[in-house]
Image (spheres, rainbow, N blue to C red):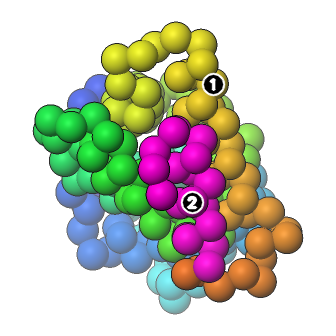
Amino acid sequence: MASPEPSTGELGETPLSATQDRILSAALELFGEHGVNGTSYQMVADTLGVTKAAIYHQFKTKDDIVIAVTERELSKLGDALAAAEAEKSHTKARELLLNAVVDHAVEHRRAASTLQFDPVIVRLLAAHKPFQLFVERLYRALIGDDTGPEARLDVAILSSTIGGTVVHPLAADIDEETLRARLLHTARRILGLSG
């Protein structure tokens, strides 16, 4: 199977085979340890016990792997985003989405650091239309109709708080339940939600 073609549609719209999913899981682990630039096709192949050609057969370039990894991880928020967008109550929509975002960030702490800060990933995502559209939808669902500076700053602070906290060294030994509860409490305060 060849690499997925670049898309301008929905994030994660191209289904992955079981083989591609295994490759992406191995690549994400290696990206976390070595960064994208420090991870080679051979390293991914060695991790899986296959040939480099087998990896190349699924993904023609490392950029294809990076985009597929990112799409796979972020598309896990797709259902929550769609549910939030369909919710009539803006407060309930924000609460639903906030819970999903915090759960995802806590559950994928190690990947969060790689996905947020690796310069190769940042560069590729800046030009990846499905990612840009997804992030716009996510922010719109959190901001709502108030697009003024305060609302935008609140969501920027929220995003930095969640993303920065799950990868911060001071939180490294904190159990997931404690981290999740504290993040939700702080995130609700930032957005002016009760609780």
Residue at (72% x, 59% y) in the render: 165
Say above or below: 143 vs 86.
Answer: above
Residue at (32% x, 40% y) in the render: 91
Say above or below: 57 vs 179.
Answer: above
Say above or below: 163 vs 45.
Answer: above
Q: Is residue 139 left or right of residue 119?
A: left
Q: Is residue 191 magenta?
A: yes
Residue assigned mark 1? 153
**Residue 124 horizontal/vertical position (percent):** 57, 35
Residue 185 — which label?
2
Picture quadrant where residue 106 is located: bottom right
Picture quadrant where residue 94 is located: top left
Residue at (58% x, 47% y) in the render: 189
Residue 78: tell me if it is visible: no
Question: Label 2's element?
Answer: helix
Residue 89: tell me if it is visible: yes
Sequence-wise, the earlier of marks 2 and 1 is: 1
Residue 114 — which label?
none
The residue most toward the right is: 170
What secondary structure is the stretch in magenta mostly built from? helix
The residue most toward the bottom is: 49
The residue most toward the top is: 148
**Residue 45 horizontal/vertical position (percent):** 55, 76
Q: Is residue 95 magenta?
A: no
Q: Amino acid at mark 1?
A: Leu
- Count of numbered marks: 2
Please report the bounds of the magenta region as a residue range. 178-195
Does the CB distance between marks 2 and 1 fall below 8 Å? no
**Residue 33 horizontal/vertical position (percent):** 74, 71
Question: Label 1's element?
Answer: helix
Q: Nearer the viewer, residue 128 or 39?
A: 128
